Image: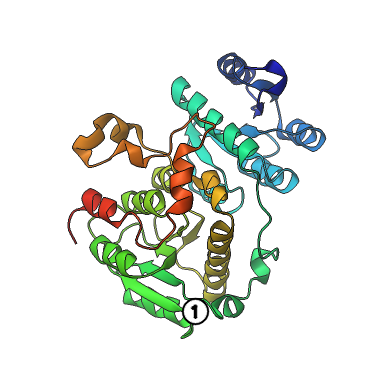
Amino acid sequence: MNTLNRPRVLCVDDEPSVLRSLNWLLRSRFDVTSATDASEGLELVRNGEFDVVISDQRMPGMTGTEFLERVKATSPNTMRLLLTGYSDYADVLRSVNDSEVFRFINKPWDNEHLIETVSYAAAVAREVPLQPSLSPAGTADIDLGALRAGHTEAVLLMDEDPAIEHQMRTILGEDMLMLWARNHSEAISLLQRYKVAVIVADTRSGRGRTVDLIRAVKRSSPNIVAMVYTHERDSSTISRLINEGQIFRFIAKPAGPGYVSRMVGSALRKHRDLMAHPSSIARYAVEQPRRLALEGSASGWDQTDAAPLGTSSFDALTVMETDTTAVSGVAWLKRLFGKV
């Protein structure tokens, strides 16, 4: 690789031993810069362009999620990875809603997996630059009523609780199509029949695993924006939803209707941005779990459905760009979850 054109990676961690390990692992493929605290890291981001930033979570003065939130504001094109040796619920939640991290990486990391993830993230940063949003207003300024007008997208709620169904219908109003599924089978059936833009899912709906459903939906129809609305407080589940489902927002129950309305409006705007700029889907590619990759076809998982990591050609992206209908991948969903 031309050393003058290597992707630039910034590693931020208050432990020198961790920085040495990351530098040793990545230096053969990337131009690696290190910082021992978040303030130093922000100064480097302000004064230089980085394709990927890897940050530890637990640092004095500023957490990794706070740091990556500022990186997002300063250098939005930079792909953000959060590195942590523990999983705190509040921190993981913030990494979704505020920092919008691409991957959540646990310590100790797997060397091959980390290299693949950084390679893919760097390729995306360079080859799929972030496109301006169609609606530049902030989340707090989003008018859900204006988003309803003249559009036929559906919002799919997957939740067993009729009270949540009533709340969501009240929020969305009569002008927006809202679909209600009480379990995974009903959700798959509705995905086959309607043009779904946003999924709002409880992690405890039905007997199946919501993580698996969201991962499958994002692989088959990556323009669908997934949100989680739940009482769930298990940080490991949320971490999986980041990596394997690329959830856009996490809403903790109970939540007020105004907040839920803003989050749904933000998700609808994101869906329309993805439809307008299909190549940007690469920025939200889901990770294939190691377990499923090893099991292969025995689990019902076809590895050809997965976007490969560590490639700059984006062969899989070409498929995603041309496969943006609401029913794309339904057969694959049925294969994974059984007949519906």
On screen, residue 140 versus residue 195, left or right, reads: right
Compared to 77, does 325 lie above or below? Answer: below
Compared to 39, does 198 lie above or below? Answer: below
Residue 110 in view here: no
For image coordinates 42% across by 64% down, the residue present is 200
On screen, residue 48 versus residue 276, left or right, reads: right
Q: Nearer the viewer, residue 338 or 328?
A: 328
Q: Quadrant of the N terminus?
A: top right
For image coordinates 34% across by 61% down, the residue present is 327
User: Would you identify the image quadrant in which residue 42 lies?
Assistant: top right
The disc labelled 1 sits on which kind of residue? Ile
Q: Quadrant of the C terminus?
A: bottom left
The furthest residue to the right: 47
For image coordinates 66% across by 23% down, the residue present is 6
Q: Secondary structure at mark 1?
A: helix
Q: Position of residue 8 (x, y in %)?
A: 68, 27
Q: Nearer the viewer, residue 42 or 120?
A: 120
- Colour scheme: rainbow
Q: Position of residue 235 (x, y in %)?
A: 43, 45
Residue 329 in view here: yes
For image coordinates 21% across by 39% down, the residue present is 299
User: Would you identify the image quadrant in which residue 58 lies?
Assistant: top right
Within-10-Å neighbours for mark 1: few <14, some 14–19, many 20+: some
User: Would you identify the image quadrant in which residue 324 lies?
Assistant: bottom left
Q: Position of residue 5 (x, y in %)?
A: 70, 23
Compared to 67, does 327 lie above or below? Answer: below
| Residue corresponding to mark 1 | 171
